[in-house]
Image: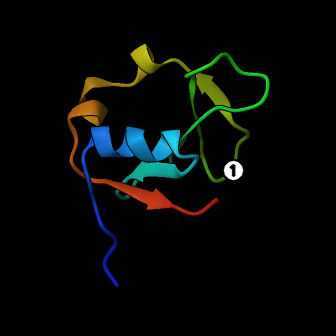
Amino acid sequence: MKKETFDFSEALRRMKEGKNVRRKNSEYIFAICGGGCFPQTISYRTCVSNILSLGVAAIPTEYILANDWEEVEG
């Protein structure tokens, strides 16, 4: 079954709902950081490492302009 893909604005909306997203075929999973992080901080992790804080401004432009975002579990 093919996963639905969408643009960054939809990815950001889903992150605000507490969901995890990534770019298609990417090892990085993005989410809004909860707990001890500053409000509205986006964090990312790979399959093998811990969550790392990443400010919104640090997201590469090509990620923000991409239309191949997808929702992922956990």
Q: Please name the amino acid that badge 1 sits on.
A: Val
State the image quarter where residue 54 is shown. Answer: top right
Picture quadrant where residue 11 is located: top left
For the image, the number of numbered tags is 1
* Residue positioned 49% across, 42% down in the render: 15
Residue picked out by circle 1: 48
Which is more toward the observer, 71 or 54? 71
25 with respect to 17 (left or right): left
- Which residue corresponds to the image point at 34% horizontal and 71% vertical from the top-left? 3
The image quadrant of residue 59 is top left
| Residue 65: image location, x then y, percent | 20, 34
- Classify 10 Å Cα crowding around label 1: few (below 14), some (14-19), many (20 and above): few
Toward the front, the furthest residue is: 17
> Height in image: 70 above or below 4?
above
Q: Position of residue 42 (x, y in %)?
A: 54, 28
Q: State the residue at coordinates (29%, 38%).
A: 9
Q: Residue furthest right?
A: 36
Establish if 28 lies above or below 6.
above
Query: Residue extending furthest bottom?
Result: 1
Residue 74 in the image, given as x and y percentages of width and height = 64, 59
Rendering colour mode:
rainbow
- The quarter of the picture where the N terminus appears is bottom left
Query: At numbered mark 1, what does the secondary structure look like: helix, strand or loop?
Result: loop
- 49 or 17: nearer the viewer: 17
Q: Is residue 52 above or below residue 7?
A: above
Whether residue 29 sits left or right of residue 3 in the image: it is right
In the image, residue 3 above or below residue 17: below
> Which residue is at 69% across, 50% downward?
48
Position of 31 with respect to 9 (left or right) is right
